[in-house]
Image (spheres, rainbow, N blue to C red):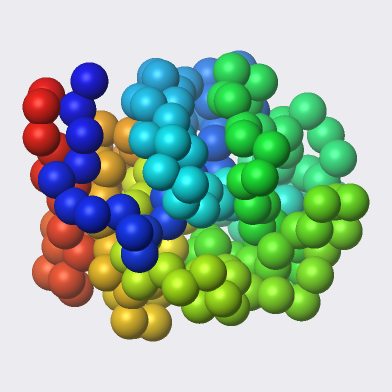
């Protein structure tokens, strides 16, 4: 198995929206969305073994969210809080000490970026802490990004990360896109690279 070439001592892993509704069988399935699970699991193991933070973001909409078709939004209803579709995929092994960040929880506001979310505490309630607050409190300067969807929430999270001064590393084989237009994911990655993100380099292979 491959290992990252970089020292992870200032890094965190962010797994974006790896939820049932974005996987095959879900309400807004990303093609092959579930195929990334073993790759994500490998990276979770690497970060966990080094005691580095792992953060799972979740799309967490109320019913009748502004992004849904019924309100002239672009998407079918998905990731409604408390439903099966909003849960992290059951094949994911989520370490006990992993963090959760929910976003998109305001009825009239959509939020693609994890940086618009709030940290969920151990008892499941939403705090006021943002993802940036959390990363700063943990001394994180480098974020490794994986998850769904490359062309929406991964892209938005990466662009915000760069803007906020984080070094952003894309684990491109651990992400998949919706691809409303066939090359949307490629374009998202190109835009992220143009803004200063990097693609992960691995040793071993
Ligand atoms: C997402 C579409 C709608 C995502 C969330 O997680 O990429 N995409 N809501
Ligand atoms: Zn959504």
Q: Quadrant of residue 162?
A: bottom left
Q: Residue 121: tell me if it is visible.
A: yes
Please determine whether, in this image, residue 88 is positioned above or below residue 200: above
In the rendered image, residue 62, in percent from the top left (x then y), is placed at 82, 54
Question: How many numbered discs, if any?
Answer: 0
Of 29 and 143, the residue lying toward us? 143
- Quadrant location, the N terminus: top left
Q: Residue at x 86, y 40 (%)?
A: 82
In the rendered image, residue 142, in percent from the top left (x then y), is placed at 32, 65
Q: Residue at x 62, y 35 (%)?
A: 95
Q: Residue at x 51, y 53 (%)?
A: 53
Of 26 and 76, the residue lying toward us? 26
Q: Residue 149: tell me if it is visible.
A: no
Please determine whether, in this image, residue 171 is positioned above or below residue 157: above
> In the visual, does 98 lie left or right of 167?
right
In the rendered image, residue 72, in percent from the top left (x then y), is placed at 66, 58
Q: Residue at x 80, y 70 (%)?
A: 127
> In the visual, does 196 lie left or right of 180?
left
Please determine whether, in this image, residue 2 is positioned above or below residue 63: above
- Quadrant location, the C terminus: top left
> In the visual, does 82 lie left or right of 162?
right
In the rendered image, residue 67, in percent from the top left (x then y), is placed at 65, 57
> In the visual, does 53 lie left or right of 103?
left
Of 135 and 101, the residue lying toward us? 135
Q: Quadrant of residue 28?
A: top right
């Amino acid at each position: 198995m491959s290992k990252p070439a970089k020292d992870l001592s200032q890094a965190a892993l962010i797994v974006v929206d790896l939820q049932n509704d974005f996987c095959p069988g879900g309400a807004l399935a990303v093609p092959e969305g579930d195929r990334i699970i073993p790759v994500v699991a490998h990276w979770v193991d690497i970060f966990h073994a080094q005691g580095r933070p792992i953060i799972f973001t979740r799309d967490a909409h109320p019913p009748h969210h502004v992004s849904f078709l019924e309100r002239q939004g672009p998407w079918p209803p998905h990731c409604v809080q408390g439903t099966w579709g909003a849960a992290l995929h059951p094949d994911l092994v989520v370490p006990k000490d992993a963090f959760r960040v929910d976003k998109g929880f305001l009825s009239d506001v959509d939020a693609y970026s994890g940086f618009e979310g709030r940290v969920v505490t151990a008892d499941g309630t939403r705090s006021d802490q943002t993802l940036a607050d959390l990363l700063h409190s943990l001394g994180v300067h480098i974020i490794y990004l994986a998850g769904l969807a490359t062309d929406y929430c991964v892209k938005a999270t990466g662009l915000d990360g760069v803007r906020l001064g984080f070094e952003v590393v894309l684990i491109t084989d651990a992400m998949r896109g919706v691809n409303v237009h066939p090359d949307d994911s490629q374009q998202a990655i190109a835009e992220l690279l143009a803004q200063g993100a990097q693609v992960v380099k691995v040793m071993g292979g």
